[in-house]
Amino acid sequence: MNFDKIIAVRTNKTVYRDGDKCLKMFGEDYSKADVLNEALNQARVEETGLNIPKILEVTKVENKWVIVSEFIEGKTLARLIEENPAKKLEYLERFVGLQLEVQSKSCPQLNKLKDKMNRKISQADLSATVRYDLHTRLEAMPKHTKLCHGDFNPSNVLIAEDGTAYILDWSHATQGNGAADAARTYLRFWLAGDIEGAKQYLELFCEKSGTEMKYVQSWMPIVAASQSVKGNAREREFLLSWTNVVDFE
C-alpha cells in the first residue's frame, strides 16, 4: 500500500489515494469496534444498490486500522458549489434528491437511530431535567425504518467525471426517521456558517418529500443534543444552544 498521496485529514484519521484504491487510516487509539462497524455499515449499504464506493478490505498497517475501498475520481458537491456559486440551488436540488433516494431504501440490519440518539442524549452536557425532556420527546416521535446517512452534507457527495453521484462516509448510518436525518443536515449547514444554504436546503427537502417544516424543526433539539457529545468546543456550544430553540408544543 502506498500512503504518499493524502486526500483528506480528519480528527484521528487520514485518507489516502493509492491508484484506484482509497485508504482510510485510523489513529492507533481508534476503537477497533468502531472501525469494523464502519466497514460493516458500508458493506450493508452496498447491498441496497445505492452508488457508494465498495469496500475492498479491512487491514492493519503499523498497528493502525485501514479501510480499503474503491477510489472514485471526481469533485464533492461542496467543491462544486464553491466553484460555481450561481448553480448552488441546482446543486442543492440534486443533493436533496440523493438524500431522498437514500431514505427510500431499507437496511434492517443497521443500528436503530432512536437507540443511538437515546445513548447520546444521556451523555450530553445538559441538566437531568432537559435530558429527560429530550428522551421523552424522542420516544414520542414516529418510529420509521428508513436508511439514514447520519452525516449527509455536500462534502459527502462526490460527483464523478461522468456525472454519476456517489455517497461517501457511512460510519454514522442507521435506520430511522428521515426527518431526523434532515434536521442533522440542516444543522450541518449552520455549523458550516451557511445559514442561507440551510434555509434553501430545508425548503427543498420539505417540498420534495412532502414533509411539514415544523415536523423537521421538532427534531432539531433532539438531534442537536445527540450530536453535542462530539466535536470541538465551539460546535458543542452551538449545538447545545439549539436544544431549546424550537417550541415543541
Image (spheres, helix red, strand yellow):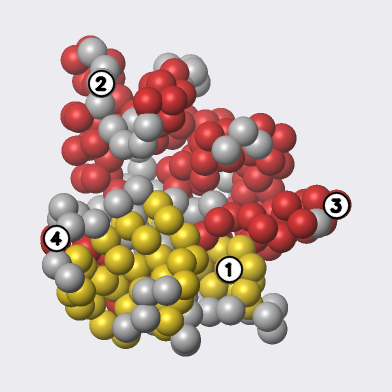
The answer to whether the residues at label 3 and label 2 have Cβ atoms under 8 Å apart is: no
Q: Residues within 10 Å of mark 2 (few under 14, many from 20)?
A: some
Along the polypeptide, which appears first: circle 4 or circle 2? 4
User: Which residue matches tag 3?
Assistant: 86
Q: Is there any visible trace of residue 147 in the rendered image?
A: no
Reading the image, the residue beneath label 1 is 158
The quadrant holding residue 90 is: bottom right
Q: Which residue lies under the disc numbered 2?
A: 125
CA gap between label 3 and label 4 equals: 43 Å
In the picture, the quarter occupied by the N terminus is: bottom left
Q: Amino acid at mark 1?
A: Leu
Residue that numbered label 4 is attached to: 33
- In the structure shown, which secondary structural element does the residue marked by tag 2 occupy? loop
The numbered mark, 4 or 1, whose residue comes first in the sequence reads 4
Question: Which residue occupies the extreme front position in the image?
Answer: 4
135 horizontally vs 145: left or right: left
Q: CA distance from mark 4 to mark 1?
A: 27 Å
Q: Quadrant of residue 32?
A: bottom left
